[in-house]
């Protein structure tokens, strides 16, 4: 018999009895009811026995459980006391640690100040030692030893930046660096002007030691500019060359010098971060802007003498020569590194400056003169009509050919810049 229904919270005795008597075994209600009652009595008896046994076991174990509970309570009280003691110790340690850390921080600050003071005293003594025989070094003219000494003085001064006389020491050091630069400058100029890579490399080390490598590059720029200007003057003094040939030869010289100086510069200033184009090209730009004698004056004088066609041909020669130089510069730096836009613009402006001024001032007059020189002779009034018509036809054809040739040359020579001026003349 299933007794699980009795454990349900919504147990209903009436429903249970009705459900039980609906079973197939309940055909004889009286006998079935007697059987059910007997089974229920047996179940009640078993439950009572089980409860009695359980109660007896609980009662027998109850004293032991009470003792265990009492022991557990005592242990909890003991643990609480220990926990309070530990909390007190932790709080005490935290307070002591905080004070100790503050003390350690103060000690570390004092230690740092003592170290800084000690180092400052050492560097002050080192500064005095380094300055002791500096005049003897200057008298010996040993540039490398002097530069190393100044480098040591700069390092020493970096550690003395908090001393009261730091400014005076800095002025003293700058004075020594100026003296060394003045002592080295004749050798620098001589080495760079003569292309002496060995001595120039020594000067690079000297100027690097005294932190003035930028100044050495200034010397390089100035010396190379002077060399370029001197070579231009020598070309101008050659009697067998006119100004156009001088300019073309000068352009060839610049391209050859660029290739030579690139190799030389990379071997000498190999540790300097500035790009080669940023150093070398401005030298040429500055030199071409300061050429003496001025090529513009010589060109203006030259193109007045020959026929207009010859003068225009000379301008074309100059333009072609300048184009070759510009293309050569671009090709040269393609494998070395990019050229900054501003540097390249300044170089091209300086390169084409004389040509640009000639085009602006003389090109219009030259083209007009060239056209007038090539135009056919006017037709004589006494000429036969047939001959006049034939002459007009030939003149018209020749004029068209001249106009087309002139326009094409203008585009080639000025890239269209002179078309507006030329069209005014043609009209």
Image (spheres, rainbow, N blue to C red):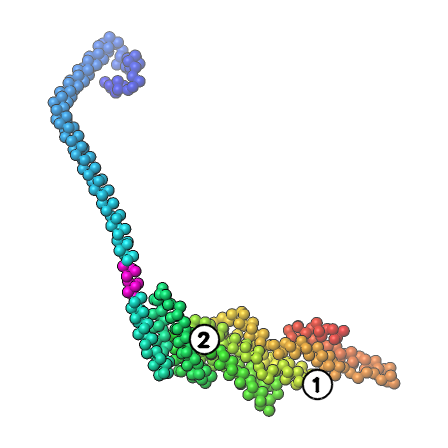
Is 169 placed above or below 93 here?
below
In the image, is 6 to the left or to the right of 270?
A: left
Which secondary structure is most common in the magenta stretch? helix
The N terminus, quarter of image: top left
How would you rate the neighbour count of disc 1 (Cα within 10 Å): few for under 14, some for 14-19, many for 20 or more?
Answer: few
Magenta stretch: give its range. 111-119
Above or below, 296 relative to 80: below
Q: Residue furthest top?
A: 30
Residue 215's tag is: 2
Residue 14 visible in this rendered orientation of the protein: yes
- Label count reads 2
Q: Residue furthest bottom?
A: 239
Residue ID at (45%, 75%): 215
Q: Residue at x 70, y 85 (%)?
A: 307
156 w.r.t. 71: above or below: below
Q: Residue at x 42, y 83 (%)?
A: 187
Q: Report whether 181 appears left or right of 126.
A: right
Mark 2 residue crowding within 10 angstroms, few (<14) / some (14–19) / many (20+) = few
The picture places residue 348, in percent across and down from the top left corner, at 57, 74
Viewport quadrant of the C terminus? bottom right
Quarter holding residue 203: bottom left
Foreground pick, 87 / 324: 87
User: 376 or 271: which is nearer to us?
Assistant: 271
- Check disc 2 and report its element: helix, strand or loop: helix
Q: Earlier in the sequence, mark 1 or mark 2?
A: 2
| 308, 382: nearer the viewer | 308
List the residue tagged with mark 1.
307
- In screen coordinates, is 180 left or right of 248? left
For the residues marked 1 and 2, what is the alpha-carbon distance in whole angstroms?
51 Å
Q: Magenta segment: does it hold 117?
A: yes
Q: Does 12 appear in magenta?
A: no
Quarter-of-image position of residue 116: bottom left
């Amino acid at each position: 018999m299933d007794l699980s229904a009795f454990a349900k919270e919504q147990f209903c005795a009436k429903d249970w009895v009705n459900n039980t008597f609906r079973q197939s075994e309940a055909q004889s209600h009286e006998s079935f009811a007697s059987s059910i009652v007997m089974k229920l009595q047996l179940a009640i008896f078993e439950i009572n026995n089980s409860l009695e046994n359980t109660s007896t076991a609980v009662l027998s174990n109850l004293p032991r459980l009470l003792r265990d509970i009492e022991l557990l309570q005592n242990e909890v009280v003991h643990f609480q006391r220990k926990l309070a003691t530990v909390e007190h110790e932790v709080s005490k340690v935290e307070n002591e640690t905080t004070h100790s850390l503050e003390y350690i921080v103060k000690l570390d600050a004092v230690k740092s100040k003592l170290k800084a003071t000690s180092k400052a005293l050492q560097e002050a003594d080192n500064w005095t030692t380094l300055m002791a025989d500096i005049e003897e070094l200057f008298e010996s003219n040993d540039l490398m030893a002097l530069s190393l000494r100044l480098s040591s003085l700069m390092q020493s001064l970096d550690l003395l930046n908090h001393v009261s006389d730091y400014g005076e020491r800095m002025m003293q050091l700058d004075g020594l660096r100026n003296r060394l630069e003045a002592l080295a400058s004749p050798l620098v100029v001589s080495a760079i002007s003569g292309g002496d890579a060995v001595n120039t490399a020594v000067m690079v080390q000297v100027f690097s030691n005294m932190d003035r490598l930028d100044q050495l590059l200034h010397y390089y720029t100035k010396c190379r500019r002077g060399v370029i200007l001197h070579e231009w003057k020598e070309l101008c003094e050659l009697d067998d060359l006119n100004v156009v040939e001088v300019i073309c030869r000068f352009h060839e010289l610049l391209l050859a010098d660029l290739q030579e100086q690139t190799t030389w510069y990379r071997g000498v200033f190999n540790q300097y971060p500035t790009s080669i184009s940023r150093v070398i090209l401005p030298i040429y730009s500055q030199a071409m802007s300061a050429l003496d004698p001025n090529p513009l004056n010589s060109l203006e004088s030259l193109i007045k003498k020959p026929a207009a066609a010859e003068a225009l041909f000379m301008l074309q020669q100059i333009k072609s020569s300048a184009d070759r130089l510009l293309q050569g510069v671009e090709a040269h730096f393609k494998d070395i590194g990019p050229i900054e836009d501003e540097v390249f613009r300044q170089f091209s402006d300086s390169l084409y400056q004389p040509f640009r001024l000639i085009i602006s001032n003389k090109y219009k007059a030259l083209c007009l003169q060239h056209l007038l020189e090539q135009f056919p002779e006017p037709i004589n009034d006494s000429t036969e009509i047939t001959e006049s018509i034939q002459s007009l036809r030939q003149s018209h054809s020749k004029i068209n050919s001249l106009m087309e040739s002139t326009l094409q040359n203008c585009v080639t020579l000025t890239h269209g810049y002179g078309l507006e001026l030329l069209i005014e003349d043609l009209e």
